[in-house]
């Protein structure tokens, strides 16, 4: 018989197990207690839900002395038994074991996951085992539901999922914070008059990890209408904040025949759908986050799912912020990029709902955004949330070839390599718009976790690459 056959998940048994039912469960032991009455209790978790199931191991088991009394925290076991009503108040049912088999023993002294409360900083050092804690199990399940909800949202609206490349020759945001990809020998790279001779590199040219799938998504939007990407993106920013990763996942929808208004509407509907879905499908994990991580998190998501987002222009926002300049660390005036403290002030203190800021100065935004008639601002939009600040950045795209070329020159974006992008404006250009949602910032917001490093299984940040 295969290992999987017959196995039931703990979530199913706790949810709908009936008394007298014969079951087989497999999982990892959280604790073992031995009673004076001559039997033991195992708290077992298999990742299918937050709750453990209690297994009662009678001393009559043939391997009680030899095995059961040597089962320690972290060990994996297979249990066959009968579902019975639980004596304890916490859960409805438990399992009376007929047999317990140790699959993998665990040395409790050496096991890095202790019973005592461990800091999230410590758990990052043992990220390979932190999934066995309540918090990281709950995060993984919520992250999974959110991923699936991303696809559900776009698929039910007729958007095509496009797989854009990881290795590219462009820097979509024009910010120069890319990780280079090369197979050249860094000790002695081939040289020419200009320096390193990248024509001898793997792709015959400079290559980097993508910072965004947007430019490629635009090409498919201008062929197929509505598309989206959902994949990893990479930024070599030396950021040590609680909201930045060097490798993060981004969701980027792109719509043809659409303007900034359509873009904002899509973003608002998208966030509300994600919040509603996670509240509906993860009640137990969300209750855990409310109790243990952030007491406001469920109320905040519920309120946002039912609220209208506030829309205002960057210029209007600056007027509000300038009146309060005394409270900020970073000075604020027209033309500066907003800091997280400014974004949070607007959404947390002034409007108390998510804020959509539009029409930023062109000097602080990427080259591809559509220039407004004032010649100074672009059709950009950022969605700001409490605690997180910017969660979504998007824009209507510049569809006019000449204006786009000028913006590339102004933004020092080399046109070499982007002639294909200009082609999209030469052959059947149409108004189009899209945005990017930082997936980890979403998971962070939904779970209330303070640090973005804790909502992705193996975080990549400057100086850290243990895994
Ligand atoms: O605002 P950004 O840079 O926009 C783009 O990349 C556009 N190409 C998107 C588009 O229009 N298709 O990034 C989008 C979002 C941000 O709002 C933020 O949530 C997240 O990506 N983000 C990060 N998340 C974690 N770590 C980082 N270093 C991030 N940088 C951006
Ligand atoms: Mg941005």
Image (cartoon, helix red, strand yellow):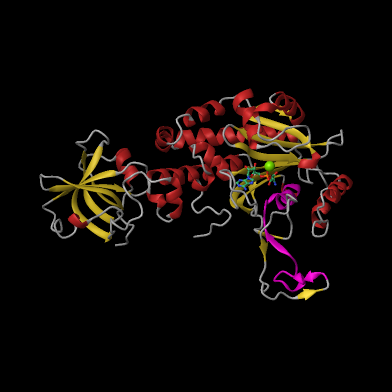
Please state if 83 lies on the left or on the right of 434 as rendered: left
- Count the labels in the image: 0
Which residue occupies the foreground of this view, 130 or 334? 334
Q: Is residue 151 something one can see in this rendering?
A: no
| Vertical order, 153 against 196 (above or below) | above
| Quadrant showing the N terminus | bottom left
Q: Residue at position x 82%, y 69% from top?
A: 194
Q: Quadrant of residue 400?
A: top right
Q: Position of residue 354 (x, y in %)?
A: 62, 29
Which residue occupies the foreground of this view, 358 or 316? 316
Q: Residue at position x 52%, y 48% from top?
A: 453
Q: Residue at position x 51%, y 49% from top?
A: 456
Rendering quadrant holding ligand 2: top right
Which residue occupies the foreground of this view, 370 or 23? 370
Q: Is residue 197 magenta?
A: yes
Q: Position of residue 365 (x, y in %)?
A: 76, 42
Q: Is residue 216 magenta?
A: yes
Q: Is residue 19 something one can see in this rendering?
A: yes
Q: Position of residue 382 (x, y in %)?
A: 68, 36
Q: Residue furthest right?
A: 402
Q: Which residues are magenta?
A: 194-222
């Amino acid at each position: 018989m295969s290992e999987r056959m017959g196995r039931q998940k703990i979530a199913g048994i706790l949810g709908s197990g009936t008394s007298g039912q014969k079951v087989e469960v497999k999982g990892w032991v959280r604790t073992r207690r031995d009673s004076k009455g001559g039997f033991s209790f195992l708290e077992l978790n298999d990742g299918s839900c937050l709750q453990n199931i209690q297994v009662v191991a009678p001393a009559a088991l043939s391997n009680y002395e030899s095995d059961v009394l040597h089962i320690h925290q972290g060990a994996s076991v297979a249990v066959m038994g009968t579902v019975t009503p639980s004596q304890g108040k916490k859960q409805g049912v438990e399992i009376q074991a007929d047999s317990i088999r140790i699959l993998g023993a665990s040395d409790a002294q050496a096991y890095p996951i202790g019973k005592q409360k461990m800091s999230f900083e410590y758990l990052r050092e043992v990220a390979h085992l932190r999934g066995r804690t309540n918090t990281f199990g709950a995060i993984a399940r919520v992250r999974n539901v959110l991923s699936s909800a991303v696809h559900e949202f776009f698929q039910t609206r007729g958007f095509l999922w496009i797989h854009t490349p990881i290795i590219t020759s462009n820097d979509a945001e024009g910010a120069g914070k890319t990780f280079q990809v090369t197979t050249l020998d860094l000790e002695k790279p081939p040289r020419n008059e200009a320096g390193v001779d990248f024509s001898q590199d793997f792709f015959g040219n400079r290559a980097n990890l993508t910072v965004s799938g947007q430019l490629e998504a635009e090409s498919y939007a201008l062929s197929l209408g509505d598309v989206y990407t959902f994949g990893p993106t990479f930024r070599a920013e030396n950021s040590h904040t609680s909201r930045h990763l060097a490798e993060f996942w981004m969701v980027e929808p792109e719509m043809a025949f659409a303007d900034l208004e359509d873009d904002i509407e899509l973003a608002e509907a998208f966030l509300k759908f994600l919040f509603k879905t996670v509240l509906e499908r993860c009640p137990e994990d969300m209750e855990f986050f409310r109790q243990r991580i952030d007491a406001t998190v469920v109320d905040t998501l519920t309120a946002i799912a039912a609220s209208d987002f506030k829309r205002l222009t960057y210029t209007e926002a600056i007027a509000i912020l300038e009146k309060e300049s005394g409270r900020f660390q970073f000075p604020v005036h027209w033309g500066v990029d907003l800091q997280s403290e400014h974004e949070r002030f607007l959404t947390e203190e002034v409007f108390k709902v998510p804020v959509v800021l539009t029409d930023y100065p062109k000097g602080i935004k990427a080259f591809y955004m559509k220039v407004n008639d004032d010649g100074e601002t672009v059709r950009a939009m950022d969605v700001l949330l409490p605690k997180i600040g910017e969660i979504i950045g998007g824009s209507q795209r510049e569809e006019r070839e000449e204006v786009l070329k000028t913006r590339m020159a102004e933004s020092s974006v080399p046109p070499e390599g982007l002639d294909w992008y200009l082609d999209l404006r030469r052959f059947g250009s149409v108004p189009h718009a899209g945005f990017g949602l930082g997936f980890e910032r979403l998971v962070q917001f939904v779970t209330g976790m303070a640090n973005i490093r804790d909502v992705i299984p193996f975080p990549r940040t400057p100086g850290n690459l243990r895994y």
